[in-house]
Image (tube, helix red, strand yellow):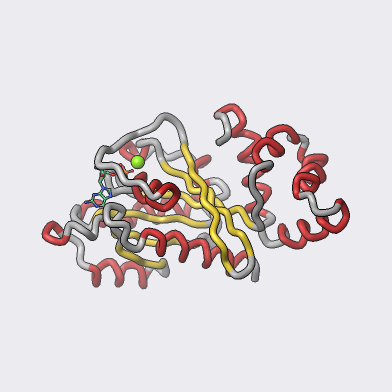
Amino acid sequence: MLKKKELTNFQNLTAYFSSNNKTTPRTQNKARTRFGSGFIRYLFHLNLRSNSFTTMAAYRADDDYDYLFKVVLIGDSGVGKSNLLSRFTRNEFSLESKSTIGVEFATRSIHVDDKIVKAQIWDTAGQERYRAITSAYYRGAVGALLVYDVTRHVTFSNVERWLKELRDHTDSNIVIMLVGNKADLRHLRAVSTEDAKGFAERESTFFVETSALEATNVENAFTQVLTQIYRVASR
Ligand SMILES: Nc1nc2c(ncn2[C@@H]2O[C@H](COP(=O)(O)OP(=O)(O)O)[C@@H](O)[C@H]2O)c(=O)[nH]1
Ligand SMILES: [Mg+2]
């Protein structure tokens, strides 16, 4: 994991990959042919231009991927964003709500077709409570999981505002998944599947109900978003 002070360079890298994700694989292949098989050499090649060799080499030495996609988690406080993330990236769930300081992200790579797609998933640090998410959080995002809690109707009512904020801060091609979390709490349900599905259709977003607790559809939600981004990016 990168140290905080390296984030600036890293954000440049993210921006680089996101803005060029259409051409990245081709460039990679070219670099591989020219320099041999070492992907690090490709990075060096890249870094000659971007001037941040140390950071990138340190970051990239331990893995390889064809695409890096930034995905953001948004939605009201307490809906289960952090637990969806920990379920997907570490297969962990926690009953406590923990807020961390500063922006945090976690990564996981999946295979789509014959490509390795690496997701860099950003989680808030509790600032959504004050609706104080900065534009840096959204910058370069190509996918989003907009999460509400199926047992708290207010979190679903707020989805409209979250959607507006998201669209105001991101590219129009962003892939959005509306996620109704805590589906395990059947006796407490306050938002019907039909209502949410209808909303998602009207807003042209994807939709799924999940349980981070029971690990239902979590894999599905992230994988669908990443696959869809990949389809758009490799078109
Ligand atoms: N029953 C149930 N509780 C959940 C689920 N996901 C999260 N929670 C709980 O909801 C609370 C808030 O979760 P958290 O991930 O911190 O929400 P965040 O504020 O959106 O990041 C915690 O107490 C979690 O244990 C779920 O799928 N089912
Ligand atoms: Mg959280």
- The quadrant of the image that shows the C terminus is bottom right
- The quadrant of the image that shows the N terminus is top right
Residue projecting furthest to the left: 187
Q: Quadrant of residue 149?
A: bottom left
Q: Is residue 88 left or right of residue 47?
A: left
Residue at position x 31%, y 68% in the image: 199
Where's residue 121, x and y in %? 49, 48
Residue 3, can we see it? yes
Q: Is residue 203 left or right of residue 21?
A: left
Residue at position x 62%, y 64% in the image: 233
Residue at position x 18%, y 55% in the image: 151
In the image, 213 versus 188, the foreground residue is 213
Q: Is residue 161 left or right of residue 40?
A: left
Q: Quadrant of residue 220?
A: bottom left
Where's residue 86, x and y in %? 39, 46
Where's residue 163, x and y in %? 39, 56
Where's residue 178, x and y in %? 36, 61
- Quarter of the rendered structure image containing ligand 2: top left
Residue projecting furthest to the top: 5
